[in-house]
Amino acid sequence: MKVVILGIDGATLDILGPWAERGGLPNLARVLEGGAHGKLRSTIPPYSAQAWVSMMTGKSPARHGVVDFFEQDANRTFRGYASSTLISGEAIWDTLGRHSRRVGIVNVPLTYPPLPVNGYMVSGFMTPKGRDDYTYPRELREEILGVTGEYDPDPWDPLTPAKDLGSFVHWLDIAERAARYLEEKHPADLNISVIQVLDQLQHLFWDALANQEARTEPQMRKAWPLIQRCYETMDAAIGYRLDRLAEGTILLLVSDHGFQAVNTWFNANRWLADQGFLRFSEGQVGRTKSTLARIGLSRESIKALIRRVDRFGLRRHVGRLTRATISRKLGETLAVPIDWPQTVAYSGTRTSEGIYINLKGREPHGIVEPGDEYEEARTRIMESLSALVDPSTGQPVVSAVYRREDVHSGEHLGLMPDIFFSLDDKPYLVSDSTTTTRVFDPIPKDYVQGRHHSQGLFAAFGTHIAAGGKVENANIVDIAPTVLYAMDLPIPTDMDGRVLKEAFTEEYVQAHPIRYEEPVVGGRKGAPPTVEYTEREQEAMQRRLKGLGYVS
Ligand SMILES: [Zn+2]
């Protein structure tokens, strides 16, 4: 069989299900009714970088090596942004190429720099701004431009206010035109294309998406029709693929994670400090305070000033890069350094949703002895975190707490936080801020309204797919082995996922026992070198992630 995958970043049945039932997304409804579907559990934590790579490799992040948006050394030194060169072992396009199958990969996050494949690859989300080497083979870029006139593999700036939603529609159309052209012009056995825009829209406009009344509020009057248009374009993309679905081909709809409402910062470092696990450096606080007092500003009033500048669009006058630089410099000035010799644990990045123990021999200023002392500290923090209640609601803050080795395994486990926690169905976004004085802070509505949820979407439709089939307990690492199974190929034994057999008809499963093969280890032939970023590119990337609420 051949396989067509339409990835829909952040797609959740919570929004799409009712919308399809009301008749607004007829093609999605066809897939849900005529195929097999269910929820798809994302990685822990459910962020796009690690999740998409897990989907494409069938491996846990600790095994494939992309554990966050940021690339870091074992001693937590920031080295750059995550890219395709970090992926250890085979991804599905490598496995298929080895079996002489052709692939067409368009707009999958974390595929910059594009990898040499048996077919073609066009990079997606996290391609540095302004680069022109985002296609494999290189000359494919000219071919795309010949069809669409312009192309940007990662066009959105989520810091753009609602009035620029027109650009969301514009770039979504261009990406879809390019994907259709390539699919038709260069046939492949596996086609993957990803619609990225839903993720951005759901971060920014969750309230209106989840609640019909919010759509008619004055500030949404112009925005809502454009948001609706993006969802309808997504549905048309499903329809286009359904209409062209040949006998012996299946269509998969997949998302890297779901979505949910968010309205409160959970400032993990402040919480750790209040619990006695972290100490802020007093001398530094004093100095910062007095400097600010001299110029008549408190830390909070400067932050408020930055927010006001944002809201009134004054940044147009100062220029975006300048503004990014100013706010970063301010952030550095305001940051209260951590007193490492007095600190047992600290918060990971926002997108790692975890806590690191300040372990001796591993952390630059580690104080916790490995062994019993480490385990004891970890247990105490996990117990405190499980018991943490938001005083304003009386409800627990986290929905689960994990030891990293209980939920991940692989050679890159050492890069991960020692403790992970889940915020599923809770209204919090974790922050690693060292400047705030409160554990909980409200998140302004015009900043972000939505956050990832662990339950995404899986749907399959076409030849040998069980009509009306229910798929339960599907995990994001199951996609790659399921695709190989549908293509009647053996599954490398280093994949963590299982075949979602329940999506197929009984006759197909009877006739096709699952086969396995030895994994291929070692480097990729002709792999591109590690990506070096200019300062300008780093600033643009930081702004990109900032707009999603991923960095401060
Ligand atoms: Zn995503």
Image (cartoon, helix red, strand yellow):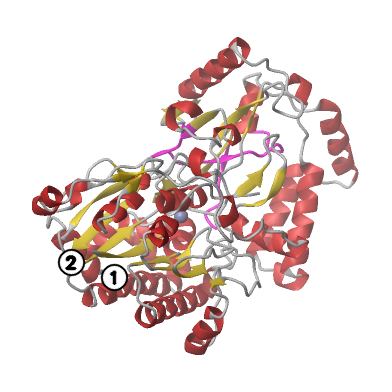
Left or right: 19 as drawn, with respect to 396: left
In which image quadrant can residue 308 be found?
A: bottom right
Label 1: few (<14), some or many (≥20) within 10 Å? many
Q: Secondary structure at mark 2?
A: helix
Q: Amino acid at mark 2?
A: Arg
For the point 82% across and 32% down, the residue is 285
Q: Decide: is 10 above or below 40.
A: below
The disc placed on residue 238 is 1
Q: Quadrant of the N terminus?
A: bottom left
Q: Earlier in the sequence, mark 2 or mark 1?
A: 2
- Looking at the picture, tell me which residue is in the foreground, 454 or 368: 368
The disc placed on residue 30 is 2
Mark 2, ligand 1, within 8 Å: the answer is no
Q: Position of residue 386 (x, y in %)?
A: 46, 23
Q: Which residues are magenta?
A: 421-447
In the rendered structure, are the residues bearing label 2 and label 1 in contact, judged by CB atoms less than 8 Å apart?
A: yes
Q: Position of residue 156 (x, y in %)?
A: 55, 68
**Secondary structure that dominates the magenta span:** loop
- Looking at the picture, tell me which residue is in the foreground, 93 or 447: 93
Q: Position of residue 214 (x, y in %)?
A: 38, 60
Mark 1, ligand 1, within 8 Å: the answer is no
Distance of label 2 from label 1 (alpha carbons): 10 Å
- Looking at the picture, tell me which residue is in the foreground, 62 or 158: 62
The disc placed on residue 265 is none
